[in-house]
Image (tube, rainbow, N blue to C red):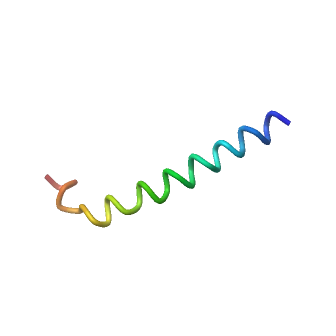
Amino acid sequence: MIQQGTNATNYFMYQLAAPIRSPPPLRAPASQSS
């Protein structure tokens, strides 16, 4: 049952990191180039 807990945490982190990491690069392309 520990694996399920890790999977849930990974999913939560991925869901939070996906949306948070997607908008910045799309809205700040010049910022990354600098």
The relative height of residue 7 versus residue 34 in the rendered view (above or below) is: above
In the rendered image, residue 11, in percent from the top left (x then y), is placed at 64, 50
Kindly identify the residue that appears in the image at 37 percent across and 63 percent down: 23
The relative height of residue 31 versus residue 5 in the rendered view (above or below) is: below
Residue furthest top as drawn: 2
Q: Quadrant of residue 4?
A: top right
In the rendered image, residue 26, in percent from the top left (x then y), is placed at 32, 66
The relative height of residue 3 versus residue 31 in the rendered view (above or below) is: above
How many numbered marks have been drawn onto this rendered protein structure?
0
In the rendered image, residue 27, in percent from the top left (x then y), is placed at 28, 66
In the picture, measured across the screen, residue 8 lies left or right of residue 2, that is left
Q: Quadrant of residue 3?
A: top right
Kindly identify the residue that appears in the image at 86 percent across and 36 percent down: 1
Residue furthest left as drawn: 34
In the picture, measured across the screen, residue 3 lies left or right of residue 19, that is right
Kindly identify the residue that appears in the image at 57 percent across and 46 percent down: 13
